[in-house]
Image: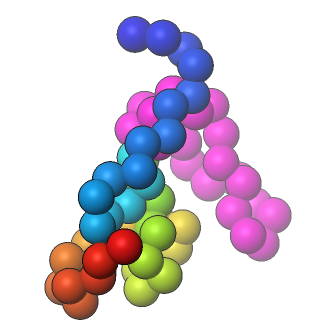
């Protein structure tokens, strides 16, 4: 697997982010970077910037 960060836009869902070494949150603190993360794109997540599945419950579509 490549060490290059990869961001994939999923259909009617979050951004799939892979191979990142860090993430800075909106308040300036460092969030926990994982091998694969899903970032909210619909704006409804209670765990922003991370996806919590709200897009599915609310039938969000891009």
**How many numbered marks are there?**
0
Q: Is residue 37 above or below residue 11?
A: above
Which quadrant is home to the N terminus? top left
How far across and how far down the image is residue 18, in percent?
A: 46, 34
Return the residue found at the far front: 62
Q: Residue at x 29, y 77 (%)?
A: 61
Image spot of residue 34 (x, y percent): 46, 39
Compared to residue 8, the image places residue 27 above or below, namely below
Left or right of 56 on screen, residue 16: right
Examine the image and state in which quarter residue 5 appears: top right
Magenta residue check for 23: yes
Residue at image coords 75%, 61%: 29
Q: Using the image as rendered, state which of residue 42 and residue 35 is in the foreground.
A: 42
**Left or right of 27: which side holds 25?**
left
Stretch in magenta: 17-36
Q: Main secondary structure of the magenta part?
A: loop
Q: Position of residue 46 (x, y in %)?
A: 43, 83
Is residue 46 visible in the rendered image? The answer is no
* Residue in view at x 58 percent, y 19 percent: 4
Can residue 40 be seen here? The reply is yes
* Left or right relative to 61: residue 27: right
- Residue visible at 46% across and 59% down? 39
Residue 15 at what x, y percent from top left? Answer: 43, 54
Quadrant containing the C terminus is bottom left
């Amino acid at each position: 697997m490549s060490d290059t960060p990869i961001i994939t836009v999923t259909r009617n869902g979050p951004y799939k982010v892979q191979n990142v070494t860090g993430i800075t949150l909106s308040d300036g603190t460092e969030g926990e970077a994982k091998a694969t993360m899903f970032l909210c794109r619909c704006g409804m997540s209670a765990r922003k910037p991370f996806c919590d599945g709200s897009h599915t419950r609310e039938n969000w579509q891009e």
